[in-house]
Image (spheres, rainbow, N blue to C red):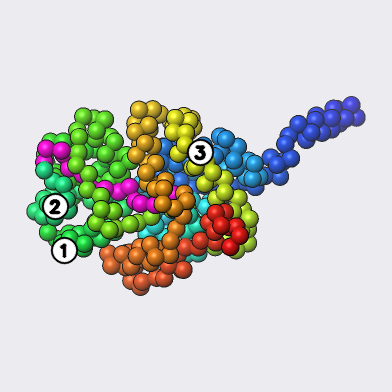
């Protein structure tokens, strides 16, 4: 009897000392696009600042990486919210997989092409006859950029992607591609200044680090999606204002943190997230229309989808324009 009373006493003490929000918090899994790094700093900032818990959410971050099969990942009922490439969502919808984009952290894709500073290669017209490394997620951007200058991939020698850029440094490859926020930073840290060729300079705008949610979650628990986005976008707004704290928050999740690299990565991330033209996370129907068109043109889908099939601005409107 005494044991039972002791147990009950301890139980009620725990109940009294535990904030009500955490007792009834909703567990939510966030599937990241890549390994832990400052690319996702806004989410880490939101978690460590209590923005998620204040909304009654317990967030579990799940690392991504090159081995993630997104078309299978979208079907994972444990992770109903995640971060991926815009075209992966278009492909998923073309296959009947019920997911939709609900926000875009990067207003412009950070995927760029770059050459050594002394090479003189500064625009895509100069790719003709050159060895060009193609990052797997950059096919849409390359096709769109070349189309703008009247060229095609057949006019260059495309090479397989690697994060080891020694072939570029040795002059065996003329042009590399990858994230401006990551590989360009890496090249410069390793002592190789580069010329950056950006698709946006040729009118190719592709959203990246797109937040998606399953249609089941959108339809059955819209309040959860709204709370998650509200906390996430607040995290990103604060991270942009406080880059040192954002990097510090990031390092806590990394197995082998490199503060110098993460500082450089986040410094280059900020202009993609906060353009000053639209609120963080915002999406436009016209841009999704162009993404759908490009996804079909490069052969990733057979049929062109409409923008309404792949995204919803329902939650962004609720958050930024509640009176509408």
**Left of 89 or right of it: where is 163?**
left
Instruction: Kindly report the distance in space between the C-alpha atoms of the residues bearing marks 3 and 2.
Output: 40 Å
| Residue at the far right in the pictured view | 1
Instruction: Give above or below for 170 relative to 288.
Output: above
Quadrant where the N terminus sits is: top right
Count the marks: 3
Q: For residue 156: magenta?
A: no
Where does the image place residue 242, in percent across and percent down from the top left? 47, 33
Q: Residue furthest bottom?
A: 303
Report the Cα–Cα distance between label 3 and label 1. 42 Å
Q: Taking 323 as reference, is 127 left or right? A: left
Circle nearer the viewer, 1 or 2: 1
Would you name the residue on which mark 3 appears? 238
Query: Toward the viewer: 187 or 24?
Result: 187
Question: Regarding mark 1 in the picture, which secondary structure is present there?
Answer: loop
Q: Give the vertical position of 316 relative to 292 (above or below).
A: above
Indicate which disc residue 31 carries: none
Of discs 3 and 2, which sits in the foreground? 3
Instruction: Give the mark, 1 or 2, whose residue is nearer the N terminus.
Output: 2
Q: Are marks 3 and 2 in contact (CB under 8 Å)?
A: no
Q: Which residue is mark 2?
A: 127
Task: Name the residue carrying label 1.
Answer: 150
Q: Residue at x 38, y 27 (%)?
A: 259
Q: Which residues are magenta?
A: 105-119
- The secondary element bearing badge 2 is classed as helix
Q: Is residue 95 visible?
A: no
Point out the image quarter for the C terminus. bottom right
């Amino acid at each position: 009897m005494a044991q039972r009373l002791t147990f009950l006493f301890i139980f009620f003490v725990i109940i009294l000392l535990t904030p009500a929000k955490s007792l009834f918090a909703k567990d939510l899994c966030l599937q990241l696009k890549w390994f832990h790094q400052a690319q996702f700093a806004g989410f880490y900032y939101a978690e460590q600042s209590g923005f998620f818990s204040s909304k009654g959410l317990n967030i579990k971050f799940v690392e991504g990486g090159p081995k993630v099969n997104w078309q299978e990942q979208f079907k994972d009922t444990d992770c109903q919210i995640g971060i991926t490439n815009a075209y992966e969502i278009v492909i998923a919808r073309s296959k009947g997989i019920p997911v939709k984009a609900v926000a875009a952290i990067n207003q412009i894709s950070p995927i760029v092409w770059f050459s050594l500073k002394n090479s003189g290669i500064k625009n895509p017209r100069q790719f003709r006859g050159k060895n060009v490394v193609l990052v797997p997620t950059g096919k849409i951007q390359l096709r769109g950029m070349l189309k703008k200058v009247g060229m095609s991939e057949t006019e260059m020698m495309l090479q397989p992607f690697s994060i080891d850029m020694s072939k570029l440094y040795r002059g065996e490859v003329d042009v590399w591609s990858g994230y401006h926020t990551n590989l360009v930073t890496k090249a410069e840290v390793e002592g190789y200044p580069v010329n950056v060729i950006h698709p946006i300079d040729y009118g190719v705008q592709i959203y990246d680090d797109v937040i998606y949610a399953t249609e089941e979650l959108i339809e059955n628990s819209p309040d959860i999606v709204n709370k998650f986005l509200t906390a996430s976008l607040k995290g990103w707004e604060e991270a942009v204002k406080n880059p040192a704290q954002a990097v510090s928050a990031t390092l806590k999740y990394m197995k082998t943190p490199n503060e110098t690299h993460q500082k450089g990565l986040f410094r280059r991330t900020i202009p993609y997230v906060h353009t000053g033209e639209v609120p963080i996370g915002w999406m436009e129907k016209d841009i999704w229309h162009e993404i759908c068109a490009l996804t079909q043109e490069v052969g990733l889908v057979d049929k062109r989808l409409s923008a309404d099939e792949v995204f919803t601005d329902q939650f962004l409107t609720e958050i930024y324009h509640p009176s509408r």
